Image (spheres, grey):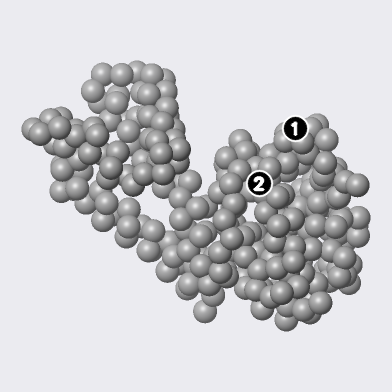
Amino acid sequence: MSKTISIIGCGNLGRAIAKGIKEDKENHFHVIATRNKIELLQPLQEIGVEITNNNVDAVNHSQIILLAVKPFMVPQILEEIKYSLDQNKILVSLATGVSIKEMQSIIGDKIPILRAMPNTATGVSESLTCICANDENASLHLEEIKSLFEKIGETVVIKEDLMDGATVLGACGIAYVMRFIRAMVQGGIEIGFDAKTASFIANQTVKGAAQLLILGNTHPEQEIDKVTTPRGCTIAGLNEMEHQGFSSSLIKGIITSFKKIEETKK
C-alpha cells in the first residue's frame, strides 16, 4: 500500500525533494506539497504532486510529514498542525538548528520525530542526507526514512549533536563546491577557453574526482599523488593555491558557517 508524504513549506529544498521522489522509477509515494504562494508550486503539479496551501489538510491525509520551513517558522507551523498529528504519523524536520527536544516541547513526545538534512542535489537524485533520531520510538522508523531519502541519493545516520555540522558540510557544502567550480571556470577563461567549454571541463573534472574517491574508497592525497610529478605544473599550481590560503580559507569558511548556526540557537 502506497503512503502519502506531505512537504510542509515547499521552497527550493522541498521542491527538489518532491521532484526527486516523483522521478524515482520505483516510487510508490503520493506527494502533497504546501506553500502559501501556491502558484509557485505549479511545476510540481505538472509531474503529479498534489499542491495546496492548507497545511492541516495535508497533514491529515499523510503518514509522513516533512517539515521544510525555515527554522524560525517551526514553532508556528507545529502549533498549527499539532492536533492533526498522532502516533501513526512520522514527523521529519529539515529545519537547521531546531532540536527534537524543542519540537517535543510543542507537540509532545508520543509522535515519532526525526531530523534529516538533505541538500539540493535531491533534484538529480544525488543528495547526501544525514538523518538522526534521539529516542527508541523514533529509531524504529529510521530504516523507513532512510529508504525514503535513498530514493534521492545517499544517506548516513548520525547523532543529533552532529546535525549542525552535517548542515554545513553536506548542505552548505553544495555552495562551497559550486564556488570552487566557478573559480575553475574563471581560471579556464583566463587561459584561453570560452565559458561553455571551461564549464564543461570543470564540471566533468569535479564529477570524475568525486567518483575516484567514492568508487576507489581512497583519500584525496592518494589521488593527488598520482597527478603530481617532480617539478611539474600540478604541484606548482597546488603550492601557489596553498600559499594564497586555499585550504585554510575553506576550513575557516566551514567553521564560520557552523558558528553562525550556533549563534542563531542562543
Which percent across, then down, holds residue 39?
Answer: 78, 41
The amino acid sitting under disc 1 is Lys
Using the image as rendered, state which of residue 196 and residue 162 is in the foreground: 162
Dot 2: few (<14), some (14–19), or many (≥20) neighbours within 10 Å? some
SS label for mark 2: helix
Disc ID at residue 25: 1
Residue at image x 74%, y 55%?
A: 144
Residue at mark 2: 150
Residue at image x 62%, y 65%?
A: 132
SS label for mark 1: loop
The reply, left or right, for residue 245 in relation to residue 200 is: left
Placement of 167 over or under 76, stated as above or below: above
- The picture quadrant where one finds residue 90 is bottom right
Placement of 108 over or under 36, stated as above or below: below
Which percent across, then down, holds residue 11?
Answer: 67, 49
Return the disc, 2 or 1, that comes first in the chain's sequence.
Answer: 1
The amino acid sitting under disc 2 is Glu
Which percent across, then down, holds residue 6?
Answer: 80, 53
- The picture quadrant where one finds residue 85 is bottom right
Q: CA distance from mark 2 to mark 1?
A: 13 Å
Using the image as rendered, state which of residue 242 and residue 41 is in the foreground: 242
Q: Are marks 2 and 1 in contact (CB under 8 Å)?
A: no
Residue at image x 25%, y 26%?
A: 190
The reply, left or right, for residue 217 in relation to residue 58 is: left
- The picture quadrant where one finds residue 41 is top right
Residue at image x 73%, y 69%?
A: 138
Dot 1: few (<14), some (14–19), or many (≥20) neighbours within 10 Å? few
